[in-house]
């Protein structure tokens, strides 16, 4: 075995010597030999460096990456984005059966500026809805393990860009659909618009472990005819808050809180959304009607923090939304209400085991003509107001087994509440004259449950903890 090893070792040294001689004697040969385009890879692996891509952050690598994708699309395969910063002045199309894979095993933080990084510059100032995305994805395609950073985006002068990633059929083929597309382990540093499905028919998308900063819209889902999945997604101003990517936490926070709609759902049939979060946003989760229809879905372990409006329901399918284990926080900004169900919403919205907190005008405002329920939920308000935590103006509502908390004057953020001292609790529930019916049962509160009923016998109210007035509060906190 030792002799065979020595023979192989001498052979390798000889080949290395020949290679070194050729590199020194003929530099042009070395470049051609090392990076000659490969039309077909026997093992199904296509390295973009072999097609002329340069990871220096200065050389436009769009054509080189697309050539690698085109080569892989013949029989299917993996296009490798190695370590480097790859400038892309144009758009990329990940064709059917092609998997573009960077070397980032997990989403990256806001520093350092390392790993497999794509740097798009095209589409600046283009806010047309149907503009091509930086990356267009077709059926059975995937994108994993990359960071995407817009080097020309300016934290002091944010400009619109098209969607970073679009999942849809080729627009030149109107009947083409896009099914089983995966986006995973991707970091978005400063996308204006993040990820979009549709408006052409698509299904079974898998958007998983995507983290980053998005400025105007995060993920929009439309015309998903078979169950789509969005899992373990976090949008946060931190990702464009550091020096490595020329960001600024405070400026990005302010922009996101006044502009971002983090998760938008048009037509989708039983979207499964699990472990998602945004901080901050103007709207955390928005449900709309498009020309394709509206949404229904299951939402578990979702969160929206530092929002104007955490959940905005404008339209949904009759089967509606099942929302479990959510946490929703709003600030005194804009509408300053965690949940708003608008008049046009006629489906069913169910909240179970969810928390609503922060300084707000209301925790909930219900205007829709459908059904809304809250079970085993928690409501509190840091804003000293005489307005009710839950304001019901239309439709039918059920509120049961829930708690209306009171906030201590001396509460320190991030710490347990003190054992004693004055607390503020806003009124609990206000049923306005336009409400069609209400069932309010088995709720409690720090000072009990205060209910204002303007619908008389249309409300069934029982087994709630009686309200008793709290002790007098300081002059800047009116007694509820």
Image (cartoon, rainbow, N blue to C red):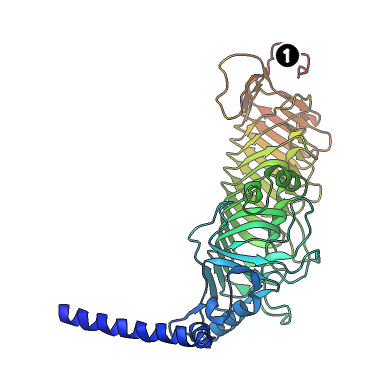
Q: Taking the image as drawn, is residue 447 in sight?
A: yes
Left of 434 or right of it: where is 190? left
The quarter of the rendered structure image containing the C terminus is top right
Left of 355 or right of it: where is 434? right
In this view, 239 is above or below 143: above
Residue found farthest to the right: 433
In this view, 210 is above or below 166: above
Q: Within 10 angstroms of label 1, few (less than 14), some, or many (20 or more) residues? A: some
Residue 301 in the image: x percent, y percent?
56, 46
Residue 10 in the image: x percent, y percent?
26, 83
Residue found farthest to the top: 472
Residue 135 in the image: x percent, y percent?
65, 70
Nearer-the-camera pick, 94 or 35: 35
SS class, disc 1: loop
Q: Quadrant of residue 470?
A: top right
Looking at the image, how many numbered discs can be counted on the residues? 1
The quarter of the rendered structure image containing the N terminus is bottom left
Q: Taking the image as drawn, is residue 1 in sight?
A: no
Q: Quadrant of residue 479?
A: top right
In this view, 92 is above or below 195: below
Residue found farthest to the front: 25
Nearer-the-camera pick, 401 or 409: 409
Disc 1 target residue: 473
* Residue located at (70% from left, 80% from top): 175
Residue 288 in the image: x percent, y percent?
75, 56
């Amino acid at each position: 075995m030792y002799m065979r090893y020595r023979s192989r070792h001498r052979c390798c040294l000889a080949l290395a010597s020949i290679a070194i001689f050729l590199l020194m004697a003929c530099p042009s040969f070395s470049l051609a030999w090392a990076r000659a385009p490969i039309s077909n890879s026997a093992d199904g692996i296509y390295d973009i460096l072999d097609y002329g891509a340069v990871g220096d952050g200065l050389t436009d690598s769009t054509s080189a990456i697309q050539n690698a994708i085109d080569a892989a699309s013949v029989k299917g395969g993996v296009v490798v984005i190695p370590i480097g910063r790859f400038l892309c002045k144009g758009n990329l199309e990940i064709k059917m059966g092609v998997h573009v894979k960077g070397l980032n095993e997990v989403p990256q933080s806001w520093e350092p500026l390392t790993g497999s990084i794509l740097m798009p510059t095209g589409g600046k100032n283009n806010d047309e809805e149907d503009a091509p995305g930086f990356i267009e994805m077709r059926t059975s395609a995937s994108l994993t393990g990359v960071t995407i950073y817009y080097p020309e985006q300016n934290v002091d002068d944010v400009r619109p860009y098209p969607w970073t990633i679009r999942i849809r059929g080729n627009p030149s083929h109107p009947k083409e659909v896009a099914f089983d597309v995966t986006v995973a382990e991707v970091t978005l540093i400063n996308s204006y618009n993040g990820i979009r499905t549709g408006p052409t028919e698509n299904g079974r998308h898998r958007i998983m472990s995507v983290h980053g900063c998005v400025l105007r819209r995060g993920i929009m889902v439309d015309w998903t005819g078979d169950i789509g999945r969005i899992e373990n997604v976090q949008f946060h101003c931190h990702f464009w808050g550091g020096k490595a990517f020329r960001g600024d936490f405070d400026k990005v926070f302010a922009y996101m809180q006044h502009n971002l709609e983090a998760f938008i759902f048009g037509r989708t049939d039983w979207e499964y959304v699990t472990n998602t979060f945004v901080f901050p946003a103007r709207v955390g989760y928005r449900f709309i009607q498009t020309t394709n229809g509206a949404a229904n879905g299951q939402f578990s372990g979702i969160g929206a923090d530092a929002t104007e409006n955490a959940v905005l329901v404008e339209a949904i399918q009759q089967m509606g939304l099942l929302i479990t284990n959510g946490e929703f926080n709003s600030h005194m900004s804009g509408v300053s209400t965690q949940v708003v169900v608008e008049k046009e919403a006629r489906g069913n919205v169910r909240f179970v085991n969810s928390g609503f907190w922060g300084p707000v005008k209301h925790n909930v405002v219900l205007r829709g003509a459908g059904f809304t329920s809250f079970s085993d939920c928690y409501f509190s308000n840091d804003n000293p107001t005489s307005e009710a935590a839950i304001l019901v103006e239309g439709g039918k509502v059920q509120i049961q087994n829930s708690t209306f908390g009171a906030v201590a004057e001396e509460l320190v953020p991030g710490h347990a509440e003190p054992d004693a001292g004055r607390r503020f609790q806003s009124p609990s529930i206000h049923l306005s004259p336009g409400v069609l019916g209400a069932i309010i049962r088995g709720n409690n509160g720090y000072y009990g449950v205060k209910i204002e009923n303007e619908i008389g016998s249309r409300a069934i109210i029982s087994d709630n903890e009686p309200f008793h007035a709290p002790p007098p509060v300081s002059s800047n906190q009116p007694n509820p």
